[in-house]
Amino acid sequence: MASELQRLTDALGHSLKRNVSVDDPAMHQIAFSSHVYEPIDLLRQQTILRKDLPPEVAAWLRSAGAYNARGPLRPPLNESIGGTEQRLCLPIRRNGLLVGFLWILEGEIELSQDELATALSAADSLAVVMQREQLADELYRAQVRELATELIFASEASTRRAAAEKLLEAELFVPNEPLLVLVVSLHAGRRAMSDEERSALEGRLDGTGRRLSERRHLGLARRDHGLLVLSDRDPLISGRARDRLCQDLLADLVRDLPGTTPLIGVGDVVDDLADAYRSHRDAERAARVARLVDGLGTIVRADQLGVYGVLARIPEGELSASSVPRGLLDLLSSGAKGKQLVDTLEAYLENAGDGPATAEQLYVHRTTLYYRLQRIEELTGAQLSNGGDRLAFHLGLKIATLLGLRSASA
């Protein structure tokens, strides 16, 4: 299908002696003429290099009426995005349904009536090919969604194994490569996404997939999060490229969905596709902890969590306020003064009971520190000289953070 689409695009460009490109309904470029004719502008060059339209370009075209146009449209020039040459837009429709856009770079010389008729005829041919391709793509996506859902969320190991085997047999994922899962979260807790949020996330996951090697990624949007299964051997995201991929995805979501707070949890690498669910669980924990612990950032690996990673493995229903020492709970609920003492206690425990180091960290005199520690002992009943009490209160602070009873720094 892609070769037929490219052939039609090349043929039209050659016939018109103009630069031609084709976008899908989301304005992702899917074909462009291989011959280069004059005129050409910066926008044409950039879209070919990116294989996508920057958000400001898509917004410009929407405002020009591209989505609602029923016939030829010439958007106004826009030098700020490099659109210095006149373009002709032909919406590609099949039975009234928008399936894409045909763009012809006209420049100062508009198409003649005969040339316009040729372009309209080509748009009709493109509509048939693109609708067929989109239907095939929808079937492909449905198959991937079903198998990816079973791979990650099925409770039975045999079901997960069968899904992995089907993905490999259908050549939907490359065999014998280690992999990991990214979890993309928009909200704290398990709050469900709105239809708009889920649609935007699905679009951005698809866009991210286009930057990856074929058969080395699977994407899925769930009720409360999105996920990407990635081959750890994909050469397109080796080294720092994976971090840039995550940063770009987050930046796009922040721009698309103001009011959300997207972050990404990165699961540990696993060797077997059937074990992708383990990496997904790791990534979910990383995303959950990142929302509760300040300083971890918005891209958090499971192996960064330290003791929080261990505690987060305890089933959520089993971890409750009763796991926190009673005296510490009282301190946590005693207002601003209590918060000061809790912060002092945490700093003291993080510094392994080193008074001078704790005083330096808190910018207080040692006398002030020791007075606060004495007050903590009086109010909680703890003996901070006792290793068992120190351990119980240190873990209690971590658990209180995971339960949302307090905020903490990484």
Image: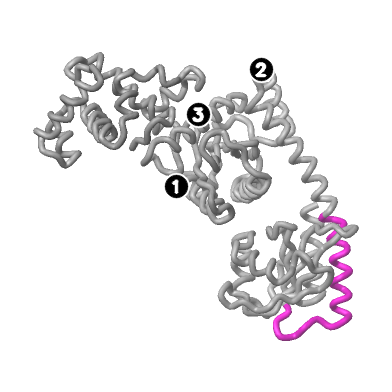
* SS type, badge 1: loop
**Residue 188 shows in the view:** yes
Q: Which sits earlier in the primary sequence, circle 2 or circle 1?
A: 2
Residue at 34% across, 29% down: 333
Disc 1 target residue: 240
- Residue 83 image position (x, y, % from top left): 62, 75
Position of 329 with respect to 238 (left or right) is left
Of the pair 391 and 191, the residue shown nearer to us = 191
Q: Which sits earlier in the primary sequence, circle 3 or circle 2?
A: 2
Q: How crowded is mark 2: few (under 14 residues within 10 Å), some or many (20 or more)?
A: few
- Majority secondary structure of magenta residues: helix
Residue at 85% across, 78% down: 115
Query: Quarter of the image holding residue 165?
Result: top right
Question: Furthest-bottom residue in view?
Answer: 108
- The CA distance from mark 3 to mark 1 is 21 Å
Disc 2 target residue: 156
Q: How crowded is mark 3: few (under 14 residues within 10 Å), some or many (20 or more)?
A: many
Magenta-highlighted residues: 106-130
Of the pair 55 and 105, the residue shown nearer to us = 55
- Residue 313 image position (x, y, % from top left): 47, 22
**Residue 210 shows in the view:** no
Residue at 25% across, 35% down: 337
- The CA distance from mark 2 to mark 1 is 36 Å
